[in-house]
Amino acid sequence: NAGVMQNPRHLVRRRGQEARLRCSPMKGHSHVYWYRQLPEEGLKFMVYLQKENIIDESGMPKERFSAEFPKEGPSILRIQQVVRGDSAAYFCASSDRDRQPRETQYFGPGTRLLVL
Amino acid sequence: KQEVTQIPAALSVPEGENLVLNCSFTDSAIYNLQWFRQDPGKGLTSLLLIQSSQREQTSGRLNASLDKSSGRSTLYIAASQPGDSATYLCAVRPAGTALIFGKGTTLSVSS
């Protein structure tokens, strides 16, 4: 059973470009979380999605950031018009939330975004 | 607002030493608490998960305790090895929401 997969692992963008980060959850998992780790900071929750639904986006910046988890295919975190402050590691986690409160989130290897 | 604090921020020990990492949280209303390991440039590996009704969990040389009423958890590592060098993250899960992380303790074990 493959773990959580994220691609690309490293992404370089110039200011003003768009960044698309992909996350494929573990097989059988239908819940996806996105977290961001800024330099010298802890991981911060961004958004929680189920298939075709955004459940909690309280951690998402109000502008330029969006996320989706379509019925088919990976979850996508999209950052429009990137700025240098978006440089960070973006982690995706998946879970089989039906097992809560024993839910365990399994993390992917992350995408390191560098904005020049 | 839930906040998670980890002390110390960094720790250096010689191989073979037993050590304790500390985690504190401000709101005791949590589902569970989880300890992760993060290697440089890598993702997170879950080490131990303690449910709110439990007091401790053990896995090999690792033992994690939880005192929910005082908002504290400790991760005990016995007989440390150079391969234990990594950043250790503590995270709590409030009811119905995502994980809230501390900033981590970076451990260096020298041979």
Image (cartoon, rainbow, N blue to C red):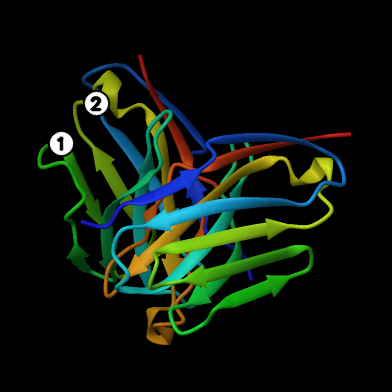
Q: Report helix, strand or loop for mark 2.
A: loop
Compared with residue A13, is residue A110 higher up or lower down, i.e. above or below?
A: below
Q: Which quarter of the rendering shows the N terminus of chain B?
A: bottom left
Q: Which residue is mark 1?
A: A64
- Nearer to me, B36 or B27: B27
Compared with residue B66, is residue B1 higher up or lower down, i.e. above or below?
A: above
Can the viewer see residue A27?
Answer: no
User: Which residue occupies 27% across, 68% down?
Assistant: B97
Q: Residues within 10 Å of mark 2 (few under 14, many from 20)?
A: many
A37 to the left or right of A79: right
B39 to the left or right of A109: right
Query: Residue B15, how many percent across, how many down?
Result: 86, 41
Q: Quadrant of residue B24?
A: bottom left
Direction front: furthest residue: B70
Q: Residues within 10 Å of mark 1 (few under 14, many from 20)?
A: few
CA–CA distance in space, label 1 to label 2: 8 Å
Q: Which quarter of the rendering shows the C terminus of chain B?
A: top right
- Asked if labels 2 and 1 touch by Cβ distance under 8 angstroms, the answer is yes
In the image, what residue type sits under mark 2?
Val
Q: Which mark is residue A82?
A: 2
- Nearer to me, B100 or B28: B28
Q: Quadrant of residue A87?
A: top left
